[in-house]
Amino acid sequence: MSCVLRASGANFDADEFLKVSWLDALTAFHRGTVHFPTSSVTRKSDYSGMKVSVSTREISDLSGQVEDAVGFS
């Protein structure tokens, strides 16, 4: 995974969006949850969101990643 789309917002319900979407999220996160549960810092997230892979090309293949990202839809 080298090129990722991140979508987030204070009122974005990632779980509901993913239920009706064809996208497969790499990860989803939720407003009010702790950012890093194993850390001693307990800062909670202000946003909900998700991350989706838009290209699996190598990180050294920037032009290929751009081509995949532009064609992503």
Image (tube, grey):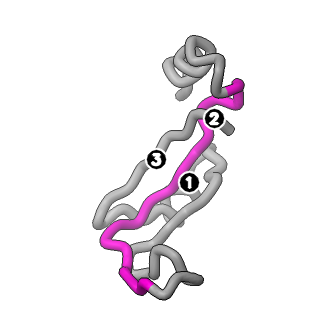
Residue bearing mark 3:
6
Q: Secondary structure at mark 1?
A: helix
In the image, residue 31 above or below residue 68: below
Locate residue 71: give its quadrant.
Answer: top right
The three-letter amino acid code for the residue at tag 1 is Val
Locate residue 23: give its quadrant.
Answer: top right
**Total marks placed:** 3
Q: Secondary structure at mark 2?
A: loop
Residue bearing mark 2:
2
Disc 3 residue crowd, few under 14, some 14–19, many 20+, Cα 10 Å: some
- Classify residue 41 as left or right of residue 47: right
- Within the magenta stretch, is there residue 57? yes
Looking at marks 1 and 3 on the same chain, the residue that comes earlier in the sequence is marked by 3
Q: Which of the labelled discs sits on residue 20, or is there none?
A: 1
Who's the residue at 63% across and 35% down the image? 2
Looking at marks 2 and 1 on the same chain, the residue that comes earlier in the sequence is marked by 2
Outermost residue toward the front?
40
Given residues 43 and 45, the one toward you in this image is 43
Given residues 4 and 62, the one toward you in this image is 62
- Coordinates of residue 72 in the picture (x, y in percent): 55, 26
Given residues 70 and 21, the one toward you in this image is 70
**Span colored in magenta:** 41-58
Who's the residue at 37% across and 81% down the image? 43
The three-letter amino acid code for the residue at tag 2 is Ser
- Classify residue 41 as left or right of residue 58: left
In the image, residue 44 above or below residue 68: below
Q: CA distance from mark 3 to mark 2?
A: 13 Å
Instruction: Tell us which disc is closer to us: 2 or 1.
Output: 2
- Coordinates of residue 52 in the picture (x, y in percent): 58, 45
- Within the magenta stretch, is there residue 36? no
